[in-house]
């Protein structure tokens, strides 16, 4: 499965815009997002459709989402928001 090219990413542009608006990650290359110095989210294409790999809750591996259609895109966006929130540093008590 190859990384998504420009034509595939063009089809995902509305989703990419929503992802770009989220705090806590940086798009280092179109469609490739990092959290701090670690790859966090990127896209693939193959004959079966478009897919996104997002770092799992433990930060060790990736989970794959089928983003060919809207339901998968909504699920990816929800998972991204949840994982970014879970990874937010918390202030020590009393600050």
Image (cartoon, rainbow, N blue to C red):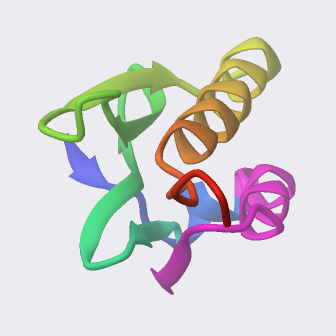
Query: Residue at 40% of width from left, 70% of height from top?
Result: 34
Residue 24's place in the image compared with 92, above or below, is below
Q: Where is residue 71, by image quadrant?
A: top right
Instruction: Estimate the x, y position of residue 24 in percent, counting from the top left.
Output: 60, 67
Residue 40's place in the image compared with 51, above or below, is below
Query: Residue at 39% of width from left, 39% of height from top?
Result: 54
Query: Residue at 51% of width from left, 57% of height from top?
Result: 92
Instruction: Estimate the x, y position of residue 39 in percent, counting from the top left.
Output: 28, 64
Name the quadrant of the C terminus.
bottom right
Instruction: Estimate the x, y position of residue 55 in percent, counting from the top left.
Output: 32, 40
Determine whether, in the image, residue 19 is placed left or right of residue 1.
right
Front one among 28 and 46: 28
Front one among 78 and 47: 78
Q: Is residue 29 magenta?
A: yes
Q: Evaluate whether residue 30 shows in this view.
A: no
Front one among 61 and 2: 61
Instruction: Estimate the x, y position of residue 81 in percent, counting from the top left.
Output: 69, 39
Residue 58's place in the image compared with 29, above or below, is above
In the image, the segment drawn in magenta is 11-30
Q: Where is residue 1, by image quadrant?
A: top left
Query: Which residue lies most toward the left here?
Result: 60
Query: Which residue lies most toward the front here?
Result: 94
Q: Is residue 39 magenta?
A: no
Determine whether, in the image, residue 32 is placed left or right of residue 1.
right
């Amino acid at each position: 499965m190859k990384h998504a090219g420009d034509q595939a990413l063009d089809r995902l542009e509305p989703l990419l815009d929503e992802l770009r608006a989220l705090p806590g990650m940086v798009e280092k290359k179109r469609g490739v997002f990092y959290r701090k110095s670690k790859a966090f989210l990127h896209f693939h294409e193959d004959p079966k459709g478009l897919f996104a790999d997002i770092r799992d809750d433990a930060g060790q591996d990736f989970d794959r989402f089928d983003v060919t259609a809207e339901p998968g895109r909504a699920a990816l966006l929800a998972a991204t928001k949840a994982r970014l929130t879970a990874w937010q540093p918390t202030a020590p008590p009393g600050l």
